[in-house]
Amino acid sequence: MEKGEITAGLADFIERQEISGIPADVLQKANLLITDFLGVTVGGSKEESARIAQDMIRQQSVGGGATIIGTDMESHPAWSALANGISGHVLDFDDVSQPMYGHPTVAVLPACLAVSEWLGASGKAALEAYIIGLEVAVKLGYVLNPVHYEKGWHATCTLGTMGATVAAAKLLGLSAEKLRSALALAASQACGLQRNFGTMTKSFHAGRASENGVIAALLASKGWTGDQAIMDGPRGFLGIFGACSVEGEETAMFSGKLGNPFDIEDPGIILKKYPSCAFTHPGIDAALEITQRPQYDARKIERVEAYLHDLADQILNHREPVTGLEAKFSIEGCLALALLDGHVSGKSFHDKKVKTDSIQSMIARVERKVDNCGDSTEPKGFGPTTVKVYLGGGSVLEARVEKARGSPENPLTPTEVREKYIDCCTGILPEKAIEASLSLLNNMEDLDDIRKLMQCFQVKSEPH
């Protein structure tokens, strides 16, 4: 392999790929992902961490033409990307990629929308840049995972930074040395540690990835330089973050896999049914299935066992959650909520709810057990999870879920995504704005100026 071949192949894909060469099914699914993200972002814009970021920007910003969703503010594209990435991720309700082990849209789309709005780009241009940026972020996961994720990196920020940069660079028309310099700037900004899961800093990772992408592309557009072979070699992006040889077959094939097929189409992107870590979803589905059985009685639960693999055990790092954010990263917390309430929603993860005696008592009765299902060498998925509920008198109710609702194998319907969008936006956006935004999103390719869509998400900020 020649020096710089991987970086050159990546840059070539970014430059040559156009929306005309993207399959119609990919475009349709991308519209659904964008709709889902914008709804989740509106909902998250009123959360405490989102408000903190908005207040910081309000105190420092002098304008810049890019909407901060859920507020009356416009700011520099980098600030907008940061704020909207945080809002989009704080609920942990945004989409997920299995190969990436991360959240692609929340990293890529805020950067894409911010630069698009700043430029006055068309919906078609924004859609093109988003799909290409998402494709790069996810395909990097094929090369780097599972090693990258198992080491403790948060791929939403590390790989998401690269995807966000690609989207911003595509919109700015970067090519040749400037494009490769943008990738180099992105590589040196990529970070994010799993240790911060269950805190506000996890959503900062997503916002930072988007901000990183805008900064990298804008600096490169002005002539900022960076290594022209940043993806290659033992000290390049792939070598450092993969901690493995960059001469392997998977790495050599990386450029050829880009868009062949697009990951939005195959294997697909997970749209979340519950606002919690994707590793909890199979367990939640299993628990909810058990609550529907005639024999089930929450008052009779003596103990609960949850069987999950070691990577899920690593990521779900809160065994005794006392806050809503911690419960989102706790199989104990999620099962307690599901078994006692018979449903899981955004309201499930309020701090007061998690701290109630009934939930804490049930959390104490949940025992997690690591089951690697024969220690397969295949990359571990978000499932399977087996839940066993022991009732009085020796009765045991058991359910096992391989793929949770929302996964490509068990997808949410477009109607369910629309309902999720409306639910997230209700009470924050005016009803007319919700209707208008859905109409524009359904015809995004025909939108001559993305600013028409973003205006739907501007609302008068409440004093705080």
Image (cartoon, rainbow, N blue to C red):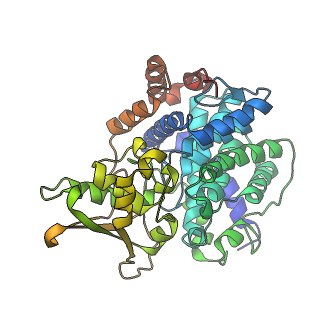
Q: Residue furthest top?
A: 432
In this rendering, the count of numbered labels is 0
Residue nearer the viewer, 28 or 63: 63
User: Can I make out residue 84 in this image?
Assistant: no
Residue at image coords 61%, 34%: 125
Q: Using residue 386 as the reference point, say whether residue 174 is left or right of it.
A: right
The image position of residue 272, as x and y in percent, is: 41, 48
Residue nearer the viewer, 118 or 209: 209
Up/down of 432 relative to 51, above or below: above
Residue at image coords 50%, 40%: 37
Residue nearer the viewer, 223 or 403: 403
The image position of residue 159, as x and y in percent, is: 63, 58
Image quarter for residue 456?
A: top right
* Image quadrant in which the C terminus is located: top right
Q: Residue furthest bottom?
A: 374
The image position of residue 451, as x and y in percent, is: 62, 24
Q: Residue furthest front?
A: 357
Up/down of 355 relative to 378, above or below: above
The image position of residue 7, as x and y in percent, is: 72, 61
* Image quadrant in which the N terminus is located: bottom right
Residue nearer the viewer, 186 or 203: 203
User: Can I make out residue 163 in this image?
Assistant: yes
Up/down of 245 relative to 30, above or below: below
Residue at image coords 38%, 44%: 345
